[in-house]
């Protein structure tokens, strides 16, 4: 049995159980051997003691795996790192507000890690609050992931500080992202490129720059995805496309970096849009959409477009940087960040999300589309009568017999 200094007991036991279950001499093989040994007697008088024993062993093995899985999520298998945490560092992008800000505070205050907080606005309120944590373990790094020069400067800053303080870069957390809510027919080319450039290309750009630093310490890459990667919602077609692409990219990258023992993980956080500033610019985006609409589209969508964005503006306002309060989110993030055997995907979702997304997978397309519409609960489209439309006037056709009689007269 390994010592406490090498591998955590929970991780060791979990791996041992999985290894045992995977071998050919375990439950399935024993059951099949027993069936071959018991003589056939027409279904009567067979001694079922052996079958009961095999079933009990099978149940015990499954129960053990589930229990250890539960202990891993609730206790974590990273307790052996407690003495090492102060020598670990993490880089998090998009720390101006929302999830990035919250993860930076959590890693600094709760885990005791050195945090490199990538901020688009280093002079903004979020960066200022992070810099006031009263510790030399919080570093604000100016970062615009859409610009190669900015990414390279951030990498150089992190490289210098890591070597100056003898730290290990344990993880890169790709959190920076943007969202523009609106139907695809309304999207301008700039708004489409904006989401693709930040959510997809920006994440790739940042990751490629930091892979060499992470590889030196067998660090990991954690990419924040979205429920839209599982089921794209109406109004978020472009955003959903970028998140789905990120998921596919992460799958390929995981296989490529496995030879360096570098885990690649995706985490889908729960619904916290109302607690973040991801929609802070939605009003400006709506104005841009309306500005570039053709006269025909304005006539077609006018009242619907107004109701649509009035509804969004009532839900999302600029709240400033706020620390999210979601214990399950932080518990799963801790496991993704520090576990010796992290999962590939982590999903944090409220019960409503779980129920709906389960139904999305098992229902026919028409039913699924109806469920998606109910799930989003956006204003409904109402076809309005065209102002220039005129009723069609049908003229009565003359009776041929009457025409004939007139000519005769």
Image (spheres, grey):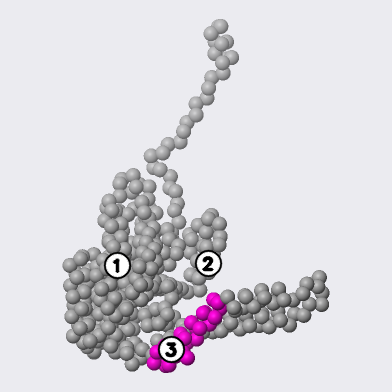
Label annotation for residue 203: 1
Spatial separation of the CA atoms under disc 3 and disc 1: 33 Å
The residue carrying mark 3 is 8
Q: Is residue 267 above or below residue 193?
A: below
Queried whether the magenta region covers residue 201, the answer comes back as no
Please state the horizontal and vertical placement of residue 53, each as a whole percent of the image. Answer: 68, 83
Magenta portion: prevailing SS class: helix
> Where the C terminus falls, by quadrant?
top right
Magenta span of residues: 1-23
Q: Residue at x 52, y 63 (%)?
A: 361
Identify which residue, 93 or 353, lies in the foreground. Answer: 93
Which residue was labeled with disc 2? 358
Q: Secondary structure at mark 3?
A: loop
Tell me the crowding category of disc 1: few under 14, some 14 to 19, or many 20 or more residues within 10 angstroms, Cα based: many
Query: Image height check: is 378 above or below 101?
Result: above
Q: Nearer the viewer, mark 3 or mark 2?
A: 3
Residue 120: x and y in percent read 23, 71
Dot placed on the residue nearer the N-terminal end, 2 or 1: 1
The structure residue drawn at horizontal position 21% and vertical position 87%, both measured from the top left corner, is 165
Tell me the quarter of the picture where residue 60 sits. bottom right
Closer to the eye: label 2 or 1: 1
Q: From this viewpoint, which residue is outermost toward the top? A: 408
Residue 85 shown left or right of residue 340 in the figure: left
């Amino acid at each position: 049995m390994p010592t406490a200094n090498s591998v955590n007991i929970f991780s060791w036991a979990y791996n041992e159980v999985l290894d045992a279950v995977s071998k050919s001499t375990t439950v399935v093989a024993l059951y099949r051997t027993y069936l071959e040994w018991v003589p056939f007697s027409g279904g009567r008088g067979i001694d079922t003691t052996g079958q009961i024993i095999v079933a009990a062993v099978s149940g015990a093995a499954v129960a053990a795996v589930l229990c250890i899985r539960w202990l891993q999520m609730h206790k974590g298998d990273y307790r052996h790192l407690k003495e090492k945490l102060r020598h670990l560092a993490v880089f998090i992008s998009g720390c101006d507000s929302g999830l990035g800000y919250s993860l930076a505070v959590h890693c600094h205050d709760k885990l005791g890690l050195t945090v490199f907080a990538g901020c688009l606005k280093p002079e903004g309120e979020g960066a200022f609050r992070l810099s006031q944590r009263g510790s030399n373990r919080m570093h604000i790094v100016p970062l615009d992931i859409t610009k190669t020069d900015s990414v390279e400067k951030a990498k150089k800053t992190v490289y210098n500080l890591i070597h100056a303080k003898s730290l290990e870069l344990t993880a890169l957390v790709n959190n920076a992202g943007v969202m523009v809510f609106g139907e695809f027919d309304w999207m301008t080319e700039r708004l489409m490129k904006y989401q693709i450039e930040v959510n997809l290309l920006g994440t790739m750009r940042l990751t490629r720059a930091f892979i060499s630093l992470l590889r030196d310490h067998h660090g990991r890459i954690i990419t924040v995805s979205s429920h839209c990667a599982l089921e794209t919602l109406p109004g978020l077609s472009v955003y959903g496309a970028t998140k789905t692409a990120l998921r596919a990219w992460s799958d390929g990258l995981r296989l490529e970096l496995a030879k360096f023992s570098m885990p690649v993980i995706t985490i889908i956080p729960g619904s916290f849009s109302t607690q973040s500033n991801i929609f802070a610019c939605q009003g400006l985006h709506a104005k841009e959409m309306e500005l570039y609409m053709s006269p025909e589209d304005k006539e077609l969508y006018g009242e619907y477009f107004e109701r649509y964005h009035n509804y969004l503006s009532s839900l999302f306002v600029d709240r400033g940087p706020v620390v999210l309060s979601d214990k399950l989110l932080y518990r799963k993030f801790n496991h993704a960040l520090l576990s010796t055997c992290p999962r590939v995907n982590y999903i944090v979702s409220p019960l409503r999300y779980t129920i709906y997304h389960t139904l999305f997978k098992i229902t026919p397309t028409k039913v699924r589309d109806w469920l998606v519409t109910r799930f989003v609960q956006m204003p409904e489209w109402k076809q309005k009568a065209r102002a220039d439309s005129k009723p069609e006037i049908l003229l009565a056709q003359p009776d041929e017999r009457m025409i004939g009689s007139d000519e005769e007269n």
